[in-house]
């Protein structure tokens, strides 16, 4: 079994995201792995990631839910086809919507455990259910709707579309 | 008319948030103002706030929706009572839930305009409707449910509760 994280399989042009890109030196560089039918990502917030003193700010929690969710959607897509994340054809996912319920303030200082599982697959849409655990308590629940986008569309967004360039 | 932003009125113990605290030197330090019945906040993302190259990462957009939403909820609370945001008794709001729809990729480089209006007030809950405009296009829609929390509860969370300390 490989110890690479989902995000380690992203090709370079998909690896700059502030939340999950291994090539973004300023970003969170989250790492997500399978843990049975669930996926897991641990994250240590920095002291300045505060809401009110002693608690984690909501934007970081939303970002973790977002990026761990799209990572899990991608990993689930490859798993459903029983192939590794670096095999062809590529499966790329972007976030269509994000919902976060802040059940209680999330204490700052401890490692956060972000967990996810696939709730539903509807064509190219994957709904990922998530929760964040800190010191044994669930403080946040979230849901991401990720949409699989054709690699061609990703390349067009990135201006890497050779056919368009030749026009 | 005062030129102070909503966040400039937050007392020091509420001014450390990574998203909106004027005292968080690492954070976004957003500034929100009334613009008629809507509120507005402009924000220039940094080059490293990327999703895929050329586009803003979703976690930042969620954070802007979150903090501009709670700021607007607070401002609306004071406005409903026809008093300034630094008058007593204090009105403090925390985010109960956040929803973000990413309608299309948000281009990175231009200033983002985050707009909000109060959709509904249900007792201590305020629902804020928001949208983000860049280069004249709405790329994101969001909703924040903010809850007014008693100052006493804020102080307990902060360990500033004198009665508890004396026990």
Image (cartoon, coloured by chain):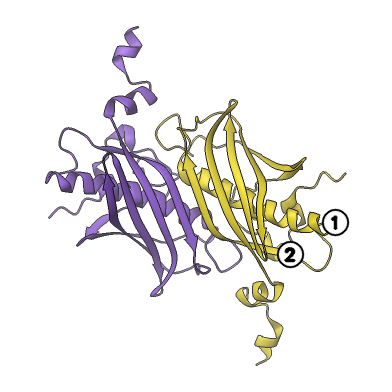
Chain colours: A yellow, B purple
Q: Residue at x 27, y 35 (%)?
A: B11
Identify whether A110 is placed above or below B125: above
Residue closest to the eye, B148 or B34: B148
Q: Which mark is residue B14?
A: none
Q: CA distance from mark 2 to mark 1?
A: 13 Å
Task: Quickly name the residue at label 2.
Answer: A91
- Identify the residue shown where x is 65% and y is 75%: A153
Task: Give x and y (percent) for residue B45.
Answer: 46, 60
Say which element carries label 1.
loop
Q: Is any part of residue B29 visible from this angle? A: no
Q: Is residue A106 left or right of residue A159?
A: left
Nearest the viewer among B50 and B96 is B96
Residue furthest to the right: A1
Residue A55 picture location, percent across and down: 46, 32
Image quadrant occupied by the C terminus of chain A: bottom right
Residue at (74% x, 62% y) in the render: A11
On-image quarter of the N terminus of chain A: top right
Q: Is residue B88 left or right of residue A75?
A: left
Look at the picture and state if A37 lies above or below A155: above
Q: Position of residue B7 (x, y in %)?
A: 29, 46
Chain on which label 2 sits: A
Pointer 2 or 1: first along the chain: 1
Give the number of the disc on residue A82.
1
Residue A142 visible? The answer is yes
Up the image or down, A40 lies above or below B154; here it is below
Residue A38 falls in image quadrant: top right
Q: Nearer the viewer, mark 2 or mark 1?
A: 1
Other residues around mark 1 within 10 Å, as few (<14) / some (14–19) / many (≥20): few
Q: Could you say where residue B119 lies in the image, as x and y percent from the top left?
A: 29, 55
Q: Chain of mark 1?
A: A
Secondary structure state at the residue bearing disc 2: loop
């Amino acid at each position: 079994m490989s110890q690479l994280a989902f995000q380690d399989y992203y090709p370079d042009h998909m690896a700059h995201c502030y939340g999950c890109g291994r090539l973004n030196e300023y970003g969170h560089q989250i790492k997500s792995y399978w843990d049975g039918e669930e996926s897991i990502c641990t994250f240590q917030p920095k002291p300045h990631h505060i809401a009110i003193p002693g608690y984690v700010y909501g934007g970081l929690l939303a970002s973790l839910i977002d990026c761990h969710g799209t990572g899990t959607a991608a990993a689930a897509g490859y798993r459903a086809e029983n192939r590794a994340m670096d095999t062809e054809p590529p499966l790329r996912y972007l976030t269509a919507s994000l919902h976060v319920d802040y059940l209680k303030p999330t204490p700052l200082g401890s490692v956060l455990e972000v967990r996810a599982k696939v709730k539903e697959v509807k064509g190219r849409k994957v709904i990922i259910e998530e929760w964040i655990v800190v010191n044994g308590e669930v403080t946040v629940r979230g849901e991401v709707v990720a949409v699989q986008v054709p690699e061609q569309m990703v390349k067009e967004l990135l201006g890497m579309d050779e056919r368009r360039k030749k026009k």
